[in-house]
Image (cartoon, rainbow, N blue to C red):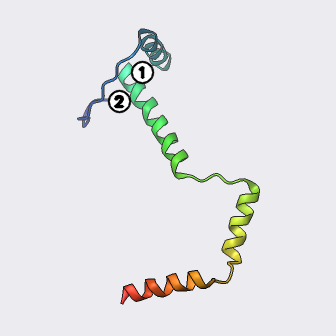
Amino acid sequence: MGSAGKIERIEARLQPAQKERIEYAASLKGTSVSDFMVQSAEAAAVVAIREHETWTLTTQDRDLFVNALLNPPEPNERIRAAARRYMARRT
């Protein structure tokens, strides 16, 4: 992977053992330390974002959610009042 088009930089301070481990891992992958760190950080970022943006439901929670979507309850007075206030503000 070349450096063409790369203009951003991130620096990190490491313990000597961390640096040695990263250098060793990069050598095992046959890549530079910089490329190894960028690839590893990017993969970790994708996982962190996915975990933050994805809901994981139990089977029971999923069934309750789907049932509420397919069979919504009748709106009560509080919901109807909120809808009236919303519609009044739109006009």
Q: Give amino acid for label 1.
A: Thr
At 69% across and 79% down in the image, what residue appears?
73
Work out whether 4 lies above or below 64: above
Mark 2, secondary structure of its residue: loop
Q: In which quarter of the image is the N terminus?
A: top left
At 68% across and 54% down in the image, what residue appears?
57
Q: Nearer the viewer, residue 88 or 28?
A: 88
Residue 46 percent location from the top left of the image:
48, 42
Q: Distance between the residues labelled 1 and 2?
A: 9 Å
Q: Mark 1 points at which residue?
A: 31
Q: Which of 10 and 36 is in front in this view?
A: 10
The image quadrant that residue 37 belongs to is top left
At 73% across and 65% down in the image, what residue appears?
64
The image quadrant that residue 20 belongs to is top left
| Left/right of residue 46 with respect to residue 71 in the rendered view | left
Residue 23 percent location from the top left of the image:
43, 14
Q: Name the residue under label 2.
A: 1
Work out whether 38 lies above or below 33: below
Q: Quadrant of the C terminus?
A: bottom left
Residue 14 percent location from the top left of the image:
39, 16
